[in-house]
Image: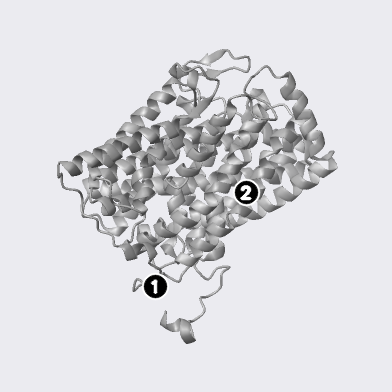
């Protein structure tokens, strides 16, 4: 067999084994029935410490990490490292936000952020608006995963759209059958492959001259680069765009529907806290993988057909043994399919609970809800394909950043609402629409430029708006999502003050302060036990002083 055939064979066998595992997940700690969103959509809220750890890592550290970030570092250098401080900032925020989210959702049986919004602010219209926004924002994020899978196939020489379509179909039916259990079980196997990949990268770099050679080669490349935006250091005026990307991305990640899905699958509040505290471990892997962009420059890697998304797969092809490259391709492939599955489940749950049940079938049974979510989860992945066809950004990471611009507009209701119900429901709806309009208008203004500064595309060319586009004498750019969020918040605060002055009735808050600290043992219910013993072991009975708590 040729080296290419070995790569394809190893990749196909491992990816096939993963998909079989996904189908088998339907029988993993099988509950009495998967015909409810509690079981199909959030795994019965019964995942313990280890399973939750793998699931959160699998859904939040995606192909975006392994393909899009190194590709951006390869293309522009230091600016691509915004993903590392962004990931570091998410850990303390996760500890604060995730625990309150889990508690109030457990107390009321929520499976989506839109349901929380409806209860908190007493408005099903606002909940529907949050649901639609979350679904639309999820589509470009799923597109990032599909682009990564497409890049692997392109590197393997498998061209055309049919391989990607087949992979998406098979993965979709895994989710259709097994629900959240499929990505949860696959996440365990994915992290094993990821650990192997990180160790292989460390050995490879050490055997190839170390990072000094990589940075030396990158410095020479960027010195000769005509693009003013690239370099080993941030360019003049580049700090503002870098900082706003970090802040905007950190805020957006908790508004994404799929982040909530992984959190709600945990069996108790302590499980969420432990996993939030341990999230920085993944940041180490992210930083190492991001530097692969520099290492690829030092090794003289050239992307396939000029597609920067193929930089990392092509690096694997050129420097790893064929069998080793095949394993690396499988790791990236699984890292693309797992989050795509979780995201499609989250989008489907939003549609089912806040649109279908609220407006189309108010009396829908749990079985009907699960059936509708299954079919919508299939459609969600093909909705992401539409984004790939309609948008052609210079870097695939722009898909995620564009999605961030959209989902950021739900922050006042979904995130700030965890601490206050002061905002008026109508003000929140008006602010959300105003923020979306502002964000889309600013995205329209962003041009896409070639390395020599020439405008390649006049509109929708990225997510960072050059301040010169607004008539300001500045070389800086700013993340459009934060500008739109600022407009959103200004509208919300001003409209709330006005509506309260006019004594317009606000919605009734159905939550209580104690709900935000509720645990599995304090709400009078106990989480199902069918999944929590895998890896974590059975729960130990409380004895002594603990028995009364």
Residue projecting furthest to the bottom = 544
Residue 497: image x %, image y %? 23, 41
Residue at screen point 20% across, 50% down? 507
Residue 149 in the figure: left or right of residue 439 = right
The image shows residue 53, relative to residue 452, as above or below, that is: below
Q: Is residue 472 above or below residue 48?
A: above
Report whether residue 360 is seen. no
Residue at x-position 29% and y-position 62%: 512
Give the percent coordinates (x, y) of residue 537.
Answer: 56, 73
**In the rendered view, would you say 294 is above or below 306?**
below
Judged by depth in the image, the label closer to the viewer, 1 or 2, is: 2
Q: Which mark is residue 283?
A: 2
Give the camera-side residue of 180 and 195. 195
- Among the two numbered marks 1 and 2 on one chain, the one whose residue lies closer to the N terminus: 2
The percent coordinates of residue 163 (x first, y second) are 56, 35
Q: Secondary structure at mark 1?
A: loop
Name the residue located 36 percent from the left edge and 53 percent from the top edge: 418
541 vs 39, left or right, is right
**Residue 526 appearing in the image:** yes
Residue pointed to by mark 1: 526
Quadrant for the N terminus in the image: top right
Residue at the location (48% across, 38% down)? 248
């Amino acid at each position: 067999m040729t080296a290419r055939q070995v790569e394809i064979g190893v990749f196909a066998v491992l990816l096939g084994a993963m998909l079989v595992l996904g189908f088998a997940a339907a029988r993993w700690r099988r509950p009495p029935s998967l015909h409810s969103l509690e079981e199909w959509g959030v795994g019965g809220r019964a995942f313990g410490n280890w399973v939750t750890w793998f699931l959160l890592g699998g859904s939040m550290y995606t192909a975006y990490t392994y393909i899009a970030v190194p590709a951006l570092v390869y293309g522009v250098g230091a600016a691509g490292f915004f993903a590392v401080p962004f990931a570091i900032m998410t850990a303390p925020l996760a500890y604060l936000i995730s625990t309150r989210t889990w508690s109030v959702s457990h107390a009321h049986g929520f499976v989506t952020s839109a349901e929380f919004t409806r209860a908190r602010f007493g408005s099903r219209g606002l909940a529907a608006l949050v649901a639609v926004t979350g679904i639309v924002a999820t589509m470009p994020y799923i597109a990032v995963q599909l682009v990564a899978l497409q890049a692997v196939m392109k590197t393997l020489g498998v061209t055309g759209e049919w391989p990607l379509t087949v992979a998406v179909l098979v993965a979709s039916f895994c989710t259709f059958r097994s629900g959240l259990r499929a990505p949860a079980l696959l996440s365990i196997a994915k992290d094993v492959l990821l650990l192997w990949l990180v160790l292989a990268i460390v050995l490879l770099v050490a055997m190839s001259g170390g990072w000094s050679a990589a940075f030396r080669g990158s410095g020479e490349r960027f010195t000769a680069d005509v693009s003013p935006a690239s370099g080993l250091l941030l360019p003049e005026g580049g700090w503002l765009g870098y900082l706003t990307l970090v802040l905007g991305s950190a805020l957006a990640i908790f508004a994404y529907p799929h982040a909530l899905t992984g959190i709600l699958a945990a069996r108790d509040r302590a499980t969420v806290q432990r996993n939030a505290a341990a999230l920085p471990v993944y940041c180490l892997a992210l930083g190492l993988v991001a530097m692969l962009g520099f290492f690829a420059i030092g090794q003289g890697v050239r992307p396939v057909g000029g597609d920067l998304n193929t930089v990392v797969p092509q690096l694997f092809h050129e420097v790893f043994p064929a069998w080793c490259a095949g394993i690396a391709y499988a790791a990236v492939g699984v890292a693309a399919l797992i989050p795509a599955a979780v995201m499609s489940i989250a989008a489907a749950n939003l549609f089912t609970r806040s649109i279908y049940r609220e407006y189309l079938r108010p009396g829908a049974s749990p079985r009907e809800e699960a059936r509708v979510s299954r079919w919508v989860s299939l459609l969600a992945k093909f909705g992401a394909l539409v984004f790939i066809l309609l948008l052609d950004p210079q870097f695939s990471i722009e898909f995620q950043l564009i999605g961030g611009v959209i989902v950021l507009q739900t922050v006042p209701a979904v995130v700030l609402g965890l601490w206050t119900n002061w905002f008026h429901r109508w003000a929140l709806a008006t602010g959300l629409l105003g923020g979306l309009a502002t964000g889309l208008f600013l995205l329209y203004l962003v041009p896409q430029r070639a390395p020599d500064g020439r405008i390649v595309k006049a509109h929708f060319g990225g997510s960072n708006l050059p301040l010169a586009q607004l008539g300001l004498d500045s070389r800086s750019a700013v993340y459009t999502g934060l500008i739109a969020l600022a407009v959103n918040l200004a509208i919300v605060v001003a409209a709330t003050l006005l509506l309260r002055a006019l004594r317009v009735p606000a919605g009734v808050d159905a939550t209580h302060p104690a709900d935000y600290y509720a645990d599995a043992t304090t709400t009078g219910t106990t989480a199902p036990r069918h999944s929590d013993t895998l890896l974590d072991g059975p729960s130990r009975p409380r004895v002594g002083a603990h028995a009364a708590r």
